[in-house]
Image (spheres, grey):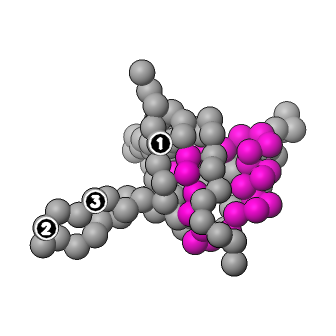
């Protein structure tokens, strides 16, 4: 089973892109605070999320940097090789559901 749910704040303004086949997509980074144990400062994880189709269009239209968002989806990895031959890997959440949380200013 591969299911992940996160709640956090957008770190930048979402930007809509369209694939060559005409499908809307946006990639956002969500800042998610970790629960803190006693005597430790709050820690934050920055999680990349990929949102497709009409959900992507709605996120770009209605969400702004700093707004709270909930994302439910699956964790996925991508691998590639840089121009100088180094192997890289990135992890991202591919959204199945998105919730707009908090109020819009």
Q: Secondary structure at mark 3?
A: loop
Closer to the camera, 77 or 54?
54
Q: Earlier in the sequence, mark 3 or mark 1?
A: 1
Q: Residue 68: tell me if it is visible.
A: yes
Label 1 crowding class (10 Å Cα cut-off): few <14, some 14-19, many 20+? some
Q: Is 103 inside the magenta-drawn segment?
A: no
Point out the stretch of residues depicted in magenta. Answer: 48-71
Image location (x, y in percent) of residue 64: 68, 69
- In the image, 1: left or right of 98? left
Closer to the camera, 83 or 56?
56
Label 3 crowding class (10 Å Cα cut-off): few <14, some 14-19, many 20+? few
In the displayed structure, would residue 1 be above or below residue 80?
A: above
Q: CA distance from mark 3 to mark 2?
A: 10 Å
In the displayed structure, would residue 62 be above or below residue 74?
A: below
Q: Residue 83: tell me if it is visible.
A: no
Q: Which residue is mark 3?
A: 35
Q: Residue furthest top?
A: 1
Q: Earlier in the sequence, mark 1 or mark 2?
A: 1
The image quadrant where one finds the N terminus is top left
Q: CA distance from mark 1 to mark 2?
A: 25 Å
Q: Is 60 inside the magenta-drawn segment?
A: yes
Image location (x, y in percent) of residue 61: 80, 60
Image location (x, y in percent) of residue 41: 22, 73
Q: CA distance from mark 3 to mark 1?
A: 15 Å
Image location (x, y in percent) of residue 27: 63, 52
Q: Which residue is mark 2?
A: 38
In the displayed structure, would residue 41 be above or below residue 3?
A: below
Q: Which residue is mark 1?
A: 5
């Amino acid at each position: 089973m591969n299911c992940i749910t996160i709640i956090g704040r957008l770190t930048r303004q979402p930007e809509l892109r369209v694939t060559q086949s005409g499908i809307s997509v946006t990639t956002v980074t969500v800042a998610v605070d970790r629960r803190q144990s006693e005597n430790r400062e709050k820690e934050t994880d920055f999680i990349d999320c990929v949102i497709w189709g009409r959900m992507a269009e709605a996120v770009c239209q209605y969400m702004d940097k700093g707004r709270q968002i909930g994302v439910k989806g699956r964790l996925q990895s991508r691998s590639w090789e840089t121009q100088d031959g180094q192997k890289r890997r990135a992890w991202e959440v591919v959204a199945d559901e998105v919730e707009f949380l908090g109020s819009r200013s």
